[in-house]
């Protein structure tokens, strides 16, 4: 497929994503309009009451997650409970591929230890 057709597909994908988002907004608007004012006010009151509590709990979770991660790293091994499993992952090994490529010219035997994974594509909004 040529680049122009790929660009057209990307634009089509973007348009569908926008359409989905607009439909979600339209749906919420219709739900809000169908709701009696007293129900909307009650929901706003609930959000005002619970919102700060949710934010405080979220902050406490983030802080405790960092503490647990640091403690598990210091412990040096994964820890599992009934509900959560803190898994220690070894650090990734990285090589200077540019430098090794140059080295491989003079020492082609190291090419036997080289593998190349499959390419992948990620989509990002601009």
Image: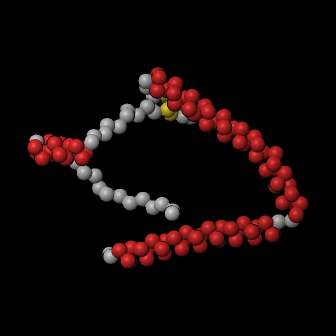
**Would residue 79 be visible to someone looking at this image?**
yes
Q: Position of residue 29 (x, y in %)?
A: 74, 69
Q: Quadrant of residue 68?
A: top right
Q: Nearer the viewer, residue 96 or 51?
A: 96
* Residue drawn at point x = 64 percent, y = 71 percent: 22
Q: Position of residue 11 (x, y in %)?
A: 48, 74
Q: Position of residue 53 (x, y in %)?
A: 75, 40
In this rendering, the count of numbered labels is: 0
Q: Residue furthest right?
A: 38
* Residue drawn at point x = 78 percent, y = 66 percent: 32
Q: Nearer the viewer, residue 99 or 34?
A: 99
Q: Position of residue 16 (x, y in %)?
A: 54, 72
Q: Nearer the viewer, residue 81 or 12?
A: 12
* Residue drawn at point x = 57 percent, y = 33 percent: 65
Q: Is residue 67 left or right of residue 113?
A: right
* Residue drawn at point x = 45 percent, y = 71 percent: 10
């Amino acid at each position: 497929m040529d680049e122009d057709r790929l660009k057209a597909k990307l634009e089509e994908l973007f348009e569908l994503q926008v359409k989905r988002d607009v439909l979600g907004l339209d749906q919420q608007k219709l739900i809000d309009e169908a709701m009696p004012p007293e129900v909307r006010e009650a929901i706003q009151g609930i959000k005002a009451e619970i919102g700060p509590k949710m934010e405080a709990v979220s902050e406490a979770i983030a802080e405790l997650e960092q503490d647990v991660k640091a403690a598990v790293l210091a412990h040096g091994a994964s820890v599992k409970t009934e509900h959560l499993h803190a898994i220690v992952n070894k650090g990734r090994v990285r090589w200077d591929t540019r430098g090794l490529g140059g080295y491989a010219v003079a020492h082609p035997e190291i090419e036997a230890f080289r593998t190349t994974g499959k390419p992948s594509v990620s989509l990002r909004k601009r």
